[in-house]
Image: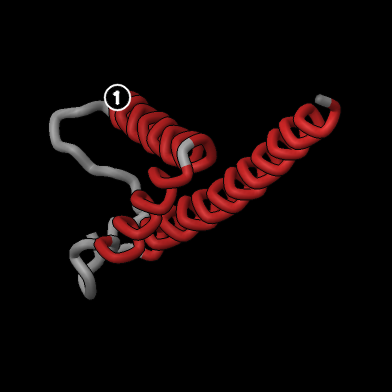
Amino acid sequence: MDEKNPAVASTEPLIVPGLLPRQVERWQALVDILYLSQLFAFYVFSALYPFMGLFYGILLLAGGVAPKTKKVGRICLILGIINLGLCLVAGIAFLVLALTGVLAGLAND
């Protein structure tokens, strides 16, 4: 932890009494893998579900203390906004195509 801000994790290697250096490396690798898988899940949910991206983005931006957390929140928010815009454009295009098809079908009768 940082002396100035205890909520910010330091980048120094973890020192755990009773563990061999190889075990400490394995724990650090496990933590890194879990962190990356969590980021992957956040980004995938933000890209697939626009409201989840907005929710995660606002939650992490507002509640995050570390700059890393705020960066992840900003990315989730951007992905959510982009996906929401794409969904709106696709919905309008589908609606226009459906209505023109229905109106063209009515004109032929």
Residue 107 placement: quadrant = top right
User: Which residue, as the protein is rendered here, is positioned at the far left?
Assistant: 18
Residue at the image point whose x is 47% and y is 56% from the top: 77
Badge 1 crowding class, 10 Å Cα cut-off, few under 14, some 14 to 19, many 20 or more, is few
90, above or below 64, in the image: above
Can residue 25 be seen here?
no
User: Which residue, as the protein is rendered here, is positioned at the far bottom?
Assistant: 4
User: Which residue, as the protein is rendered here, is positioned at the far front?
Assistant: 109
Q: Is mark 1 on a helix, strand or loop?
A: helix
**Image label count:** 1
Residue at the image point whose x is 36% and y is 49% from the top: 56
The color scheme shown is secondary structure
Left or right: 90 in relation to 32: right
Spot occupied by residue 46 in the image (x, y as percentages of width and height): 47, 42
Left or right: 11 in relation to 99: left
Q: Mark 1 points at which residue?
A: 23
Residue at the image point whose x is 61% and y is 42% from the top: 91
Q: In which quarter of the image is the N terminus?
A: bottom left
- Nearest the viewer among 87 and 100 is 100
104, above or below 12, in the image: above
Type of amino acid under label 1: Gln
Residue 97 placement: quadrant = top right
- Nearest the viewer among 37 and 61 is 61
- Nearest the viewer among 23 and 80 is 80
Can residue 51 be seen here?
yes
Q: Quadrant of the C terminus?
A: top right
Residue at the image point whose x is 71% and y is 43% from the top: 96
Spot occupied by residue 85 in the image (x, y as percentages of width and height): 60, 53
Spot occupied by residue 52 in the image (x, y as percentages of width and height): 39, 43
56, above or below 40, in the image: below
Left or right: 46 in relation to 107: left
